[in-house]
Image (cartoon, rainbow, N blue to C red):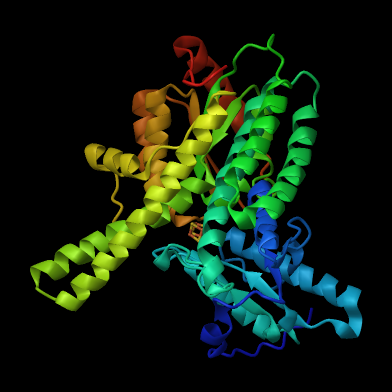
Amino acid sequence: MESNKVINFQSLSQNVGRFNLRNKKFLIPQMNRIGSHLLAATFRGFGIDAKVMENDKGLDLGMEHTSGKECYPCQITTGNILYFMQKEEEKLGDSFKPENYIYFMPEADGPCRFGMYNKYQRIILDSIDKLDRLKIGSLSTDDGYSLSGLIEEEQVRDLRKTSYFSVVVADILDRLLWRIRPYEKEPGTADDFIENSMHEMEDTFAEYGSGNEFDKILGKLEDIVREGEAIIDPAITPKPLIGMVGEIYLRTQVHANQDVIRVLERYGAEVVNASISEWVNYTTYDGLRDAKIGLRLNLKQFRLRAVKEHLKKAVSFGAELFYQQSKQRQVYKRVRSLIDLDEDHKVAHLEKILKEQDLFSFDVGTEACLSIPGIVEYAMEGYNGVVNVYPFTCMPSTLTSAIVRPLMNKLRLPYLDTPYDSSFQPGREAAIRTFMYQAHQHFKRNGRKKFSGHR
Ligand code: SF4
């Protein structure tokens, strides 16, 4: 792909934002595989032509169009969209029209660089022939990832509910895989089973999602969980339990993290990774928290108009958070009556841990707000080790590591940092093996967390 190095700064505001998706192909990057596919199926249920892009072929293109200083997920996603468009052009020839697509790249506000990915990618797309016509659809944490403007206003609420539901169901399917794979009777069965289940669930979301028929979707999920539990060999005794935290893209994207969960399993682990719903709940919680702070400050200064605005925001974020957490609880309750999967903690509880132990503040923001107390919880609950997975030079994860490492030493809980970029580090597997040796020792000395659900 030829770049003509033209920078059009106006395009940063005009061609990045919320655009109506009707009659467009909506391109979703593949972060966690199941979550991206269920989200795409949800959009299809609402009549949007949504597609998940391949994830493992664009890295060379991404590296060609970046300087090497960007965060690794930015390089990967840049490469994937360029690769996808290149293939579409080859396939469609003269009828290829980039304006018929919307590329999805959400953002978060500071202090780290995720908010800049879509602007940076805009500059790259604008510098490539025709791709200046490809718009970037962006949602922001500023308004709790509001979907307003993407489809007809009367459907926005239903789309939001089903999208959130798809995130929770995808988390459960991921957790089901990590729960059954280390104990499967036949190697490979769990992977095949979850892959098929994901496709069945896509059909279910496409059929029932737009009507918010969650009971039907839950019924299907229960069938899958029952079938999945039968894959477990009861003769295999429990293994050391490893908790995973880190940067959301790297810890959930198996190509990017060189399939770290599978490597840990190879050395005898059962792994629980932090969920995607946790991040969604965090952004809503943070919106509510900001609104409450604004409300307090403006009340003190009698700025009545601002008080009204913040009050409105607080009510809206509060209602959203209540909905999300109760929906999540309902789904986990039904699933945990069938199999013992770990549940997420409430974000308010995580903030309380940070305050009580004086480790970090939600005022700073970023995923460190979740990773640090998440690790503390793993330690308190009886996990046998913790892995922090992140892109090389990632700011929030490096912060997490600096704060948590001495704490883990004090608690004598095995802890491993696994920073990733596109290179393969020769010592990585040895580090994981050593970590798992320590986790086995911890398991022998202390046993492991028992989930409160059915086993
Ligand atoms: S979380 Fe880490 S990888 Fe993601 S944008 Fe921030 S610094 Fe980059």
In this orientation, which residue lies closer to the viewer: 29 or 323?
323
Residue 134: % across, % down: 69, 80
Rendered residue at 89%/77% (across/down): 92
Rendered residue at 69%/8% (across/down): 235
Q: Is residue 399 visible in this depiction of the protein?
A: no
Residue 278: % across, % down: 46, 46
In this orientation, which residue lies closer to the viewer: 204 or 254?
204
Rendered residue at 51%/40% (across/down): 274
Vertically, is 439 above or below 160? above
Residue 215: % across, % down: 59, 41
Q: Is residue 190 visible in this depiction of the protein?
A: yes
Vertically, is 452 above or below 294? above
- Quarter of the figure with residue 8: bottom right
Q: Quadrant of the C terminus?
A: top right
Residue 395: % across, % down: 44, 56
Q: Quadrant of the N terminus?
A: bottom right
- State left or right for residue 147 relative to residue 346: right
Vertically, is 368 above or below 190? below
- Quarter of the figure with residue 78: bottom right
- State left or right for residue 351 relative to residue 427: left
In this orientation, which residue lies closer to the viewer: 430 or 323?
323
